[in-house]
Image (tube, coloured by chain):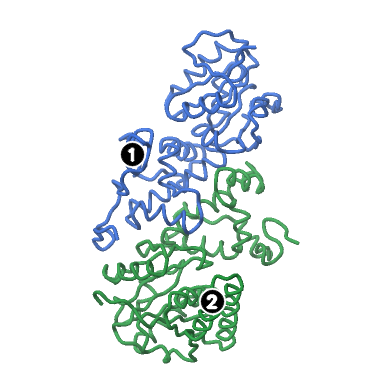
Amino acid sequence: MNEFVLLVGKGKLVEEIDSYLNQQGVKTKTLDQVFPANEVIAVFDLETGLNQEKRQLLQQVETRVTQQTPIFTSVLHRTATEIASWLFYPERLVGFSPLLLPKMTSVEICFPIQSLRPNHKLLSIWKQLGKDVEIVGDQPGLVFARTLALLVNEASFALSEGVAKATDIDLAMQKGLNHPQGPLQWADQVGVHHLYAVLEGLQREYGEDRYRPAPLLRKMMYAQFIGVESEQGFYSYGAQEMRQDPHCFADRPERRSKMLSDA
Amino acid sequence: MTGQTWKSPAVIGTGTMGRGIMDMLITAGYQVKAFDNCKKNRISAREWLEERWWKLAEKGKKTLFEVESMQERLMLVDSLQGLSDCDFIIEAVPEDLLLKRNIFHQLDSLTSAETVLATNTSSLSVTSISSKCKHPERVIGLHFFNPVWRLPLVEVVESAHTPLELVQQAMSWLQTMGKEPIHVLDTPGFIVNRVARPFHLEAYRIVGEGLADKNQVDRILRSAGFPMGPFELQDLIGIDINYSASHSVYEGFHYDPRFRPHPEQRALVESGKLGRKSGKGHYIYE
């Protein structure tokens, strides 16, 4: 059989998941290739959905696959329910969180309310990939991305208030709480835009101020400071994806008693 | 105070944090004076530290000679006056603003104006603790993490009065003792307690809304690389402790909704489900 996963989206996350799937022996194709509809075993839509492109892409996808083909869509910014409302056959849509997918032993998925009785047969691809499936409720960011987005948001507020410099904030969370990475470095790794998308999605869905993205994050979105992917996030990056510079553009040494040295 | 390194440190309060700080100073070779207003606490702190050091000797990490001289370097005193000749006093009494303010007020007149007065606090304002001092410019915050010998981080807190030189000297001094200090401003929760708030609070919301159960949240976040999920972590540190940290940051930011605690936190505390220490918390412990 010539089965494959149809990958939708662009950017570093898509490349990472593409190479992960290939390593697992799963072939991938994209919309610009020619293929018969019945060979698509699943669609992975990784578009974050901050603009209208996601909707157009998914409507295009529906014309290229069968009615039953499971479509896994990134719910970092929108709920699966909202995304399903764009489709002719919403029952086969499943939300998932693509962040850290290659690394995590589990995958978080959610069903839209349109699939009144969730069809677990849609999930067979995850068994094939050896992932533990965690079925959670349908809200932007699900569990991990939502948690990380809020940690990064708070770190961004603290950074722009000058409470500590960026490297100290990262060191604090690593050394004080044994987090695998500091929030700002972590955001640069996974992509600031994905986490921003979660915050804006939560703010819209809940209408609550607690999810308001820090003004610093909004500015970083305007400037496309999205992290390693654009070689500039909270930190600057060179060709080898190494952190080149401990200095962060948003540091405010003047707030801390004119602390100029890097003591 | 330029170019000064401190030679005779002291610790006030011989609870968990005080013991960890005493251990750090004595291990670094200092003669340490320690005071606690409860005699039983002082004595049990000495016994506890000595037991810890002898265990290290059994494992071959300390020689018998080293342990004996460490024991000699710990001097318990029975009044605050006994600390008057010390040059760096670290207070580590319970998190009670009035208690701390009172101790600093007394130390202010008992010690020379050159003596540095440090407070180990995770949630109180250092500026507020030093507000009754005649010389608030010698007051600094040092937020240590428990257990002190395993967690190298120290948040060095600059109050509204602390000069930069003192912050930098304290940071270099801590580095000589193997610590990794960071410089933070005197704001609610500093960095660690503030930035960690959503890790706990959002987990309560996710579960409260029925999006996932506690086990799932812990499993997912561990899978993403956190050493522990929020619920198992709260059971370890104490749900009451975590709740009071939530509350103090919330209050400190004048009830900014980002920090709003969750009703279940209070319900758990009031029903005595405090975590591992009470046998029951988010999970049940035998």
Where in the figure is residue B132, as x and y percent of width and height? 35, 80
Q: Secondary structure at mark 2?
A: loop
Question: How far apart in space, not on screen, are marks 2 and 1 (Cα)?
Answer: 47 Å
The residue at the point 50 percent across, 79 percent down is: B66
Near mark 2 (Cα within 10 A), the count class, few <14, some 14-19 or many ≥20, is some
Label 1 CA crowd tier, 10 Å (few <14, some 14–19, many 20+): some
Q: Secondary structure at mark 1?
A: loop
What amino acid does circle 2 point to? Thr
Mark 1 highlights which residue?
Answer: A237
Q: Is residue B56 above or below residue B43?
A: above
Picture quarter with the C terminus of chain B: bottom right
Task: Tell which of B6 and B39 is nearer to you.
Answer: B6
Q: Is residue B238 above or below residue B95?
A: above
Q: Nearer the viewer, residue B131 or B42?
A: B42
Q: Is residue B86 left or right of residue B49?
A: left
Q: Looking at the rendered structure, which numbered label has been put on residue B63?
A: 2
Mark sitting on residue A255: none
Q: Where the N terminus of chain B falls, by quadrant?
A: bottom left
Label 1 is found on which chain of the structure? A
**Res. B127 image quadrant:** bottom left
Q: Residue B96, percent across and down?
A: 49, 75
